[in-house]
Image (cartoon, rainbow, N blue to C red):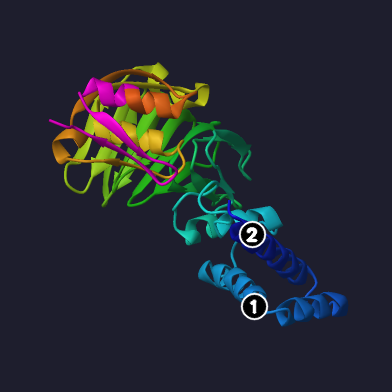
Amino acid sequence: MTREEIHQTAILEEAALIFVQLREAPDDAALLAERDAFLARGPAERAAYAKIQDGWRIAGGRRRSNSVLGLLLAIGLGGAAYVGAAPLRIYLLADAYTALAVETTSLASGDLVHLDASSAILDNSAGQVRGVTLLKGAAVFDVDAGTRPFAVTLGDAEVTVRGTVFETAHLGDGLSVSVAEGSVDVTIDDRTWLVEEGARLTWSPERGVTVMPISLESVGAWREQRLVVNDVTFGEIAEILDRRLPGDVFVFGASLSETRVSGSFDLHNPQSALRVLAATADARVVLAPPVASVLMRID
């Protein structure tokens, strides 16, 4: 970071701290005086405080975490190291989100969720309802059987289960649901498909629904820093690797993006995995760190 970026970051941190403290004690005279003194220091301080306020308004004030760090990450403090270029609203709404690593968390319902890198969820569990909205990325759910069904909403789809282990993921403008144990019902546009153990459903606006067999070890293999794929598009794998890299990964050319790939990738080093992926299709990686990695064929 440049000296100016460090300075701007420090101002944002201070603004976020004052904002969070005032949300907890809006009538505290000392805090109000501290805020006024901060704003009086100059235009940079006023702009930083306005940025914090605007970010909160975008989400309608619904974020349940009041942590300064959570608020700063949601607003994209420090560029893209934590939240990439994802929409601000996602991270302000999310109850749990990850940066460039996998994390495991428990939902209010007591169910377990493994979040892939650069992923976010909103916990919808309350009363007789169990479930989440997958806002971004991918997640593996380990759901105990019970009297209350568990539902995952992602885009235009809803996945309903009672007891199973399964993975859901956003893929471009589509989605995928893979089942390791039990079975799930996937509802899209008022139609429902039963997806059983060892099967994967994919959907996109262009191709509709496809259900295919998969190996059980491939479901959420990223939890162990592995990616196991069989007849998956080059573009889908690039998107999974994109979650683990700073900046963005672009695939240049529709024919390359649609190339089918099978194999296993080591996710401990995503940049190396990206090069391995390129080699499977006679492509190369053109780096423009930290902004982008471009995958393309060069004749």
- Residue 67: tell me if it is visible: no
The amino acid pointed to by label 2 is Thr
Q: Residue at x 44, y 28 (%)?
A: 270
As drawn, which residue projects farthest toward the front? 3
Residue receiving disc 2 = 9
Label 2 neighbour load within 10 Å: few <14, some 14-19, many 20+: some
Query: Helix, strand, or loop for circle 1?
Result: helix
Residue 115 image point, x, y percent: 52, 37
Q: Is residue 264 left or right of residue 62?
A: left
Occupied quadrant, residue 13: bottom right
The amino acid pointed to by label 1 is Arg
Q: Quadrant of the C terminus?
A: top left
What span is in magenta? Answer: 276-299
Residue 169 image point, x, y percent: 39, 39
Residue 290 among those drawn in magenta: yes
Of 180 and 46, nearer the camera is 46
Q: Residue at x 44, y 47 (%)?
A: 136
Q: Is residue 194 left or right of residue 44?
A: left
Q: CA distance from mark 1 to mark 2?
A: 14 Å
Marks 2 and 1: in contact by CB < 8 Å?
A: no
As drawn, which residue projects farthest toward the right? 30
Q: Is residue 132 above or below residue 24?
A: above
Query: Helix, strand, or loop for circle 2?
Result: helix
Q: Residue at x 27, y 51 (%)?
A: 190
- Residue 293: tell me if it is visible: yes
Q: Is residue 38 left or right of residue 124?
A: right
Residue receiving disc 1 = 46
Residue 102 among those drawn in magenta: no
